[in-house]
Image (cartoon, helix red, strand yellow):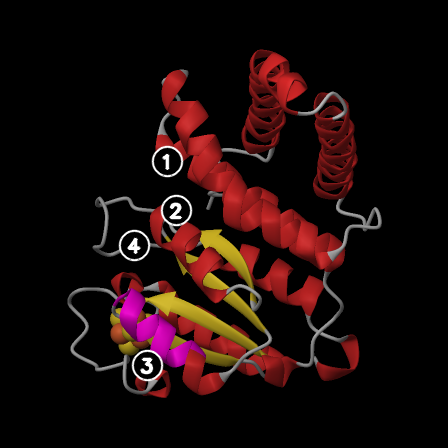
């Protein structure tokens, strides 16, 4: 099965850089227009404001370069968690806004955002105990002809091979991690509140992954896009090997 990460990190990283440059140009332009008024008010005020803006821009540029390097090389370039938080919380809506100007589809930006998020997790996260990791799956992965109720208890799955739930259950057992199946965002939130994982490996469409990553923060969510051969929300699939690779990267070796 092909890797479902069709859109890589580049789109979101370049859009973020472009957006921040645009923001700096706009703020500097604003300063230019209001500085004569500020000067009338107090002669030193334009200079003080410009100095504060320069410091702010410097922090922004350094932070962006570090996030860029961390994501591209998947190594920790001294990024503080709060920088990642700012990036995850605020850059997505800004990039969607800028993307709209350039007629870039929201779905592409969302997929790229998930790739960047995953690369930051790989770069920054320590290894986790298996008991702190939760695999969260959407109900649409279950084959529609399957009569078994797996949302209440995923262990009910007979692992018949008709859908990916069986293979993922085997994987979860092999690594000793918890697994849950949610029928929607509300139930997913409830599961996370109840199980209190330190890291979530979530499978979903880009829309649910983006909102899940933002909602769950500061709990880190490693997002894996589902594959939709029959359209959204029905008999979806996932590349199980991608989940295995994520577990290999994230779980502490002694716990496997
Ligand atoms: S693998 Fe499990 S969930 Fe999927 S069809 Fe078979 S029994 Fe049902």
Q: Are marks 2 and 3 in contact (CB under 8 Å)?
A: no
Task: Give the percent coordinates (x, y) of residue 30.
Answer: 56, 18
Q: CA distance from mark 2 to mark 4?
A: 13 Å
- Label 1: which residue? 107
Closer to the chain start, of discs 1 and 2, is 1
CA distance for labels 1 and 3: 32 Å
Contact between marks 2 and 4 (CB within 8 A): the answer is no
| Label 1 close to label 4 by CB (< 8 Å) | no
Could you say which quadrant of the image residue 34 lies in?
top right
Q: Is residue 95 left or right of residue 137?
A: right
Q: Nearer the viewer, residue 53 or 39?
A: 39
Q: Secondary structure at mark 3?
A: loop
> x, y (%) of residue 152?
28, 86
Check disc 1: other Cα within 10 Å, few if <14, some if 14-19, many if 20+.
some
Q: Nearer the viewer, residue 7 or 50?
A: 50
| Front tag of 1 and 3 | 1
Q: Which residue is mark 4?
A: 236
Going from N to C along the chain, the mark reached first, 3 or 4, is: 3
Q: Nearer the viewer, mark 2 or mark 4?
A: 2
Quadrant in which the C terminus appears: bottom right
Q: Is residue 255 above or below residue 230?
A: below
Q: Which residue is mark 3?
A: 157
Residue numbers of the magenta segment: 184-192
User: N-terminal of the two: label 2 or label 4?
Assistant: 2
- Structural crowding at the residue carrying mark 3, measured as other residues with C-alpha within 10 Å and reported as few (<14), some (14–19) or many (≥20): some
Q: Give the label on residue 206, or none.
A: 2
Q: Nearer the viewer, mark 1 or mark 4?
A: 1
Q: Please report contact status of discs 1 and 2: CB closer than 8 Å, yes or no.
A: yes
Whether the residues at callouts 1 and 3 have beta carbons within 8 Å, the answer is: no
């Amino acid at each position: 099965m092909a890797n479902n990460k069709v859109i890589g990190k580049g789109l979101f990283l370049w859009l973020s850089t472009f957006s921040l440059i645009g923001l700096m140009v706009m703020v500097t332009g604003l300063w230019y227009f209001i500085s004569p008024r500020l000067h009338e008010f107090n002669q030193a005020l334009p200079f003080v404001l410009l100095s504060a803006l320069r410091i702010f821009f410097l922090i922004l540029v350094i932070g962006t370069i570090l996030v860029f390097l961390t994501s591209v090389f998947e190594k920790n370039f001294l990024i503080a968690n709060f920088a990642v938080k700012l990036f995850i919380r605020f850059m997505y809506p800004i990039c969607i806004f800028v993307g709209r100007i350039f007629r870039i589809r929201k779905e592409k930006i969302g997929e790229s955002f998930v790739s960047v998020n995953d690369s930051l997790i790989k770069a920054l996260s320590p290894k986790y105990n298996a008991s702190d990791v939760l695999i969260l799956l959407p109900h649409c992965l279950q084959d529609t002809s399957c009569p078994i109720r797996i949302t209440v208890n995923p262990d009910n799955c007979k692992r018949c091979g008709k859908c990916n739930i069986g293979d993922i259950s085997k994987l979860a057992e092999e690594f000793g991690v918890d697994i849950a199946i949610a029928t929607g965002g509300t139930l997913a939130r409830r599961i996370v509140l109840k199980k209190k994982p330190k890291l979530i490996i979530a499978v979903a469409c880009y829309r649910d992954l983006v909102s899940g990553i933002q909602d769950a923060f500061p709990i880190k969510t490693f997002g894996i896009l589902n594959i939709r051969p029959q359209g959204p929300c029905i008999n979806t699939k996932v590349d199980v090997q991608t989940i295995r690779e994520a577990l290999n990267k994230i779980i502490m070796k002694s716990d496997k």
